[in-house]
Amino acid sequence: MEQTEPRIGVFVCHCGVNIGGFVDVPDVVEYVKTLPNVVHAERNLYTCADDGLAAIRDAIKEHDLNRVIVASCTPRTHAPLFKRTCEEAGLNKYLFEFVNIREHCSWVHMKEPEKATAKAKQLIAMGVAKAALLEPQEEERVPVEPKALVLGGGVAGMTAALSLANQGFETYLVEKEDELGGFVRNLDTLYQTGKDALESITPLIEKVTANKNIHMLTSSTLKDVEGYIGNYEVTIAGDGGETVAKVGAIIVATGAEEYKPAGLYGYGEYENVVTLKEFERMEKEKALPEVKSVAFIQCAGARGQVLEYCSRICCTNAIKSAMKLVGTDAPEAEVTGRRRRRRAVAAPPHETEVTIFNRGITTYGVEHELMYNTARGMGVKFVKYAPENPPEVSKEGDKLVVSYHHETLKMEQTMYPDLIILSTPLVQIPEAEELSKMLKVPLGRDKFFFEAHVKLRPLDFATDGVYLCGTAHAPVFIDEAIYQAYGAASRASIPLANGYVQAEAITAVVDEERCIGCGRCADICPYHAIELAEKEVLLEEITLKIRKSSVNPAVCKGCGTCVVTCPVEAITQRNFTTPQITAAIKVFGGVSVPLEIS
Amino acid sequence: MTAVDDLIRDAGAYYCIECGKCTTVCPIANANPEFAPRLIVVKAMAGIANVALEPDIWRCMTCETCSEMCPYNVLYSEFIRGLRAEAVSTGIVPVCSQHDLMQTMMRIMATPGIEQNRLGWVTPDLKIADKGEVFYFTGCLPQMSTIFRDQEDVNLLGIAQSAVKIFNRAGITPVVSNQEVCCGHDLNWTGDEVNFEKLMRINLDLIKKSGAAKVVFTCAECLRTFEIDYQDIAGDLDYELLHISEFVDDLVAEGKITFDGVEEKVTYHDPCRLGRHLGIYDAPRNVIGAIEGMDLIEMERTREKSACCGVSAWLTCDSIAKEMQLARMMEAVGTGGDKLITSCPKCQIHLRCAISEEMPIEREKADIPIEDFTILVANSIKAGA
Amino acid sequence: MEPKIVAFCCKWCSSAGADLAGTSRMKYPPNIRIIRVMCSGRIEPSYILRALELGADGVIVTGCHLGDCHYIAGNEQAKKRVEMTTELLETMGIDPRRLRLEWISASEGARFASVMTDFVEEIKELGPSPLGGVS
Amino acid sequence: MVNKALVIGAGVAGIQASLDLADKGIEVYVVEKEPSIGGRMSQLDKTFPTNDCSICILAPKMADCFGHHNINVMTYSEVQDVTGSAGDFTVTVLKKARYVDEAKCTGCGECMEKCPVKKIPNKFEMGLGFRRAIYLPFLQAVPRVATIDAENCLYLTKGKCGTCAKVCQREAILYDQKDEIVEINVGAIIVATGYDVWDPTPASEYGYGRYPNVYTAMEYERLICAAGPTQGHMERRSDGKRPLKIAFIQCVGSRNVQMGRPYCCSVCCMHSTKEAILAREHHDDIESFIFYKALRTFGKGFNEYMERAKSDYGVVYINSDATVQENPENQNPIVVYDLDGHIEKKEVDIVVLATSLIPRPETRILAEKIGISVDQFGFLESVDKLLAPLDTKIPGVFMAGYCHEPMDIPEAVAQASGAAARAAEVMEVR
């Protein structure tokens, strides 16, 4: 880039008395005028007021300024305003520099006006030094293919695809099984509807199937992914051969599966010890033997027993099944007597005894908790056990025995259930590991996909362009998977709707000539924005294959960590270059600038 | 299906989530760490042994502090009451204070064909009738006043006399019957359901014959027994059941009664049966508030969180009960009030009992006159109104 | 003696903390010159040495608390690099106390002020940098 | 078809929904009744299970939202009426007079320093701190514009004073400013009105309001926050002493049929765990005890967080509800609880109550105006709990966040994005 002679204009703000009351602003302005490259300096009562902004615009024209500095408050609130003003006057907004002499100076040194004035002078001088080295930047726009790929045809994937399709985006929906529906296909009924599981989601399946914007690829899997946000080329392998598609965004909705608790509570050893999902299957297929007494054991393999986490959904699901087994109607509240006297409202006696061994029932929120209350009223028994002292399952003759330590009563007890149902956690599917590598998105310690930020970016990956929903993220109920799916669709639709992605021009840039292809930058980049590509280089008439790194500006977030890692100064960060930063350091040290422009 | 299972259902103990809140608020548990209401329920739910045989079921005062605070509304006192009946049916004999005198007396009353002489307190100035709109249910006041004749500062007959005075002032001639028998409250709470029912039948027949549309009670226990226990067994009664405070509250609202002004500071003790069992908190306060110049100062433990007088159905009188009574009396003294008002004759008996010659503290720290609500009201009514 | 101190602050946490110290009018000595970067992970060890070479009596590097980095883990890189630089200073015979690393969040205005006050005090105790500075 | 959207409430859910829509070119009005956006999350000190500083991660989003060219932020405003149907709603918004010219005010704070009305309990600080009659609700408020509290301003109530106008160099004070009614036209509406903190005074067994050293969890958040009224120093209410023992009591007012709130608030087990961890991070001699009914660690990383609280921070969990008494000598709260079937009493320095988080009463009124339904507790109801969890019964009106059901921040954020997608489907932007 051609380096023009810097012509810097500096606007020092009084901010009423906020700066002016403690910093000698006229003195500062006189000083600033003596700084190299400064061709104009003025003071304003309020630079952010209309007249202050007009003064900037006028000065740019009048003095042919090619750099502007405002010394006032924090860039946090006012930088966008001043940048806009520069642009209005035809100046590239990256040629603007902000110096904070209010929060960082006048307000914290109110008792020492002379020192505050000296500090303000130096802070501005440092800013001037940096500004002299600023370069105009263009924010690169990378075009986006307005199509999406959704991985997984369960409720989450279907919902995400449907929402994208309804927003007008062509969407590929990839499902490894030959039918849509995912995990729900294994279930008997859903607690939310009280109805048959498959029947409950049939309207969704029908909508997806009928939608013209959705390309349904069942019995298919993702084979390969190339590219980055806006520009992925994906290869999907299916029965009918391979499909190659260009998509702008990818949603991971690959779901989860149930943990098989081999070796726990006689699972795999005794016949009538099953998992919750197996039990659902038995119910669905009407294959349930006649049972008089049933025991559920919660947290089988979870919360530290094998896996670390709580699987969120098992308590409600066990309760749902228990209520069905007990088979009485839910009791209704009844008030008798003319005063406030309330009679108890427990249901009448029932045939099947159900006991749920638990470590504290986790029915959060409204619906689940109300179900738990109803279940107790129906006579479902809840017995707490301590994690260090779980129930033991054995056999006496052909009878199953549960020996347990009642946690509240501190007593050893036994019961003889006909059936034992183990509530085991959801776990990641085995294909996830490979998928995570293919998409360059991480898995967490719990093996579930790991989002960009636990609190504020739950559906994004750190890698732009890839999004997440449903049980691929962590165990959730179907309704939760559905709102997450809508959310992931929303996140994915942003680049698709804009048709481009544009990043603030503070991204890292690789000087290919200097790059030695060591790959440290790519290793350290938290966003996978750096790629190492093999390039052919002609060296003394020999063609060499050398690795060179390149930063994808659509993915880079401008943290600058790679710049520091590079051992050969091959990477710079736009707007935060080493010469710019060291110029400021030099001014601080009292060296007049510019000394050197490397 | 065992009797205990039925009880679990009737009391809603199924809803227990073992949170222990009952224990934390239980006055007994607070004094005796060995006692925990939570354990009794959880044991019953776990089906371990027969909880009806646990001695702890007799120590509970059935004050319902726990039920009041139970997040899931488990009717703890109902559960305990049932367990006691179950215990008695297995042959257990409860040990009651006063050498079982009260219960024996009640069982005798349940015997048909005995002609009582219970109206000796009706002085000539009091107008009563055999039939009428309003039935005044006296309860055991005549018998109790005999039994506790030597106890200082307890005026039980005065309660009955005051009640009739109030009726008469309002232009009402109440039915007061010599055939009335004990409501059976104490039998019901010590597991004698058989004799309890006998007493109930006698009373219900009697009231029916009187033609009353309203039955008014000066005893919180009697009202609770009619309102809840009788109606549970006999179904809804077709007359209104009112505590005297509610009755007077209405009279005041209608302007049928006005009060003389009196400069007095009082505090009010909510009896368990009237308060937590029946939810009557406002009526007595409204009436006291209507007496000009009378200042009601609340104790810290009031209304739903009122302290228990320590004894119920003559079962639970022991050193813990005495401590609770003293603490309550000290709390009353602490208000700076001139007297303590209550609306349960038994609260009065039990609380006064604690103020004996031998006390672990200086007498003045716990000594405050106790007056029954009904007497307070009768004494404050404007003459000739 | 008035020490000269450079503070490198990340945009997201520590310079926001400095802003908050300002809005809360929390006093600290005027010896600090803030140089703002996007992330503490952008701060090169050479900047630190350069600042010392050019007359800084102390250099303080600040960033988001560990785990809070706006860029996932840039501050962990900063930590490694500052640790390395500290060791280097020690070897070079420059008191490593002249370099400090602190995590200051956007809500810790008071902490910003107290850390800066404390650092200035410490540098005062150490006296002028043996490097003297160019000016 | 109006390709604009209205978001009601600018907490983290409202902000996220607005940003999602605005980022893809849809113009958004976001109406917030407080003088600043940010909502409940801006009041929290840290967030579980990462212990991220709450305002640090939220403030950039607040700035993005306020500065976004497609977002029109209307603070100190309330929705008064909604008519029309999906694709074309007419919304009446009351812009309350803040008596300050938003365009002129720089938030410099000069006026707040000089305002003579000093001791108004600050709502943002849960009453633990004070503000003046002209104020910024908190230091990171967005917009950074002062507001005059008309009820307490001497000039507006008595015609005296006028100090703020005198000291304001920008002449931004407008005592004669009037409430304004603004009509806006939108295609879709997202309701994200959040929650209220239940005042536990009626549950007198916990002693709140009676014993000075009993706090609500939200008060505690402000107490330990570095930007809070005590600069994060843990000084207890009665004597300023630093606590050494803290008891946290869960489910205060919730999971309680008798109190009419049988639901679980979903976040309290975790926020108490967080608060106990933070206490230990402040001072490593602090002991924390958490009294719970059932410990619910159902979110991603929650169980691991709780285990860490036990092993690394010495947090003790006790399975019992509790009641609170007070030691009159030193005003230490005494926690009474049931330990394995016998009563125990533990004297601590402060008690923190995990009070119920309840739907705002205003949400019920708003729902009536829009014609959408609330459940018996006041949470907004879905038209189809399973397949359309974010849709209300009125097409074009969606919901997100705690006003819909109890949830934590990531769930609210996910729902906000979800509601944005549903709104975008109505818009047919493409």
Image: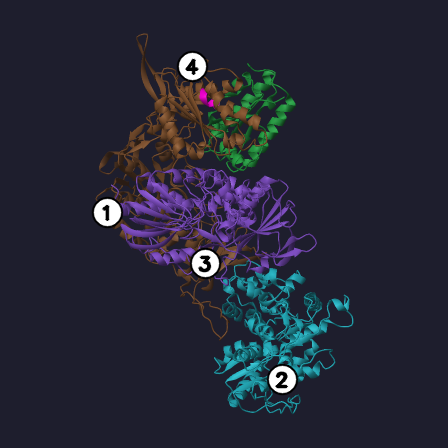
Chain colours: A brown, B cyan, C green, D purple
Whether residue D312 appears in this view of the structure is yes
Q: Residues within 10 Å of mark 3 (few under 14, many from 20)?
A: many
Q: Are marks 2 and 1 in contact (CB under 8 Å)?
A: no
Write down the chain letter for disc 4.
A
Write down the chain letter for disc 1.
A
What is the distance, in whole Å, between disc 3 and disc 2 at their CAs? 60 Å
3 and 1 marks on the same chain: yes
Q: Secondary structure at mark 3?
A: helix
Q: Secondary structure at mark 4?
A: loop
Foreground pick, D82 / D182: D182
Of labels 4 and 2, the one closer to you: 2
Whether residue A529 appears in this view of the structure is no
Q: Which residue is mark 3?
A: A372
Q: Which residue is mark 1?
A: A209
Of labels 2 and 1, the one closer to you: 2
Foreground pick, A349 / C83: C83
Instruction: Inspect the image, locate mark 1, and give the three-letter code of the amino acid beneath it.
Output: Thr
Instruction: Inspect the image, locate mark 2, and give the three-letter code of the amino acid beneath it.
Output: Ala
Left or right of residue B33: residue A324: left
Q: Are marks 4 and 3 in contact (CB under 8 Å)?
A: no
- In the rendered image, residue A563, in percent from the top left (x then y), is placed at 43, 22
Q: Which residue is mark 4?
A: A597
- In the rendered image, residue A245, in percent from the top left (x then y), is placed at 25, 34
Q: Is residue D410 above or below residue A337?
A: above
1 and 4 marks on the same chain: yes
Of labels 1 and 4, the one closer to you: 4
Instruction: Inspect the image, locate mark 3, and give the three-letter code of the amino acid beneath it.
Output: Tyr
Give the residues in magenta: A124-129
